Image: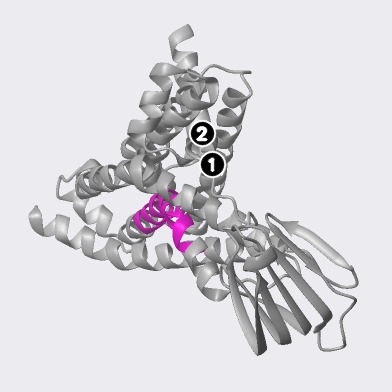
Amino acid sequence: MVILDRYVLKLWLAPFLGFFLVITGLLLFGRTLRVIQAFGDNPIESNLLLAMLLAIMPYFLTLTIPFAFFFALLKVLSYLQQNSEADALLAAGISPFRLLRPMLILAVMLWLFLTWTAMQWMPAGQKAFNLLYQAVKETSAMPNFAPQQFTQGFEGLTIYHVGEDELGNMKHFMLEDKREIPPSIYLAKEAKIQRQDHFLVLNMRDGVHLEGKDAALRSTYFTTFSLAIDVEDIGVVKITSDENIRPSMMDMSALTQMMQSNPSIALQAEWHRRWLLPSTIFILLLFALPLSTSTKRSGKSRGWIWGVALLLMIYNVQIALHKQVVMAKLDWWAMWVGQLGFMIVGFILLLFAVKYNHFDVRSFIYSIFKQHGKNEI
């Protein structure tokens, strides 16, 4: 029997890795397009984009791992049936449930990993993604200095100039820096501002730096002078405080503490969503055998179509119920009713597939009416 377990796992591993890479790649590609589109014509550095994608990866794992697990299992079971290996096992007295034993053990292991991801790794990633998104969005939306004569878009900084040339150099430039005492003033014939990561780099030419006042006034002349300004220090980027962190950004301990002190609807919905997402893998395990078994002349494409439809249905029902709970239109237990409903249907179809050695919706409905007719007689 151990040989059978190894054989099933060997057949499952390669498709799982393939489906995982493809599904994850599609989700990352879609999120990349959304991020780029969100910033419009403002460029985003590749390292910041990569950091944002890595931060959102834990959330994607809660989706891609169950999806890849399901499609790989669907492929294995379809392969065993289409090649009559499942028939040989049945002839040897081996139940179809026996084929699912290694998959059940694997599903429990993946569930433990996904639960940890949903409780700890995913909220940390959501928080990092939000901070990076806000930072890039705000720094890419910095004021344009042309053709304004003065700009007061920064805390403690005021910039004056009379216009820009075709190269973007500001003419007759003056910068007043009131962030420190005593304040400083920079005067230059021309200057240019560029953004590098989280810094504004101000390059000035042919000017003077004035510092202090009255008798303590000092002046320093320069031919070229560069000044780097941290955008966070001047208020362009404001880091989210702990008070403004959404429930999706809290780890499980923080979320539990907040629920004990202030059990709001949003906190309850997020707490139950963390447990609900990983459990989806057990629903997909129940549906895998029914959707993979069919009469040989019907082919195996039907199972894949039903599988895609099932995933879309589960995903959309989870989103819809979570949204209704957050909006206080349903109680938190409605989310588990939907999850439990899928499990019951999956278990019934699994029993049906084992009993008749194939799954067909028409046969299933016919058997129900037939049994109901016998009961009436």
| Alpha-carbon span between mark 2 and mark 1 | 30 Å
Asked whether 110 falls inside the magenta stretch, the response is: no
State the predominant SS element of the stretch in magenta.
helix
Q: Amino acid at mark 1?
A: Tyr
Identify whether 342 is placed above or below 105: above
Q: Residue 21 versus residue 360: which sits nearer the camera?
A: 21
Identified at 57% across, 58% down, the residue is: 232
Residue extending farthest left: 2
Residue 229 found in image quarter: bottom right
- Which stretch is magenta? 53-73
Most foreground residue, 132 or 315: 132
**What colour scheme governs how the chains and residues are painted in the rendered image of this protein?**
one colour
Q: In this view of the protein, which residue sits in the foreground, 246 or 372?
A: 246
The residue carrying mark 1 is: 315
Element assignment for label 1: helix
Above-or-below relation of 335 to 203: above
Return the residue at label 2: 243
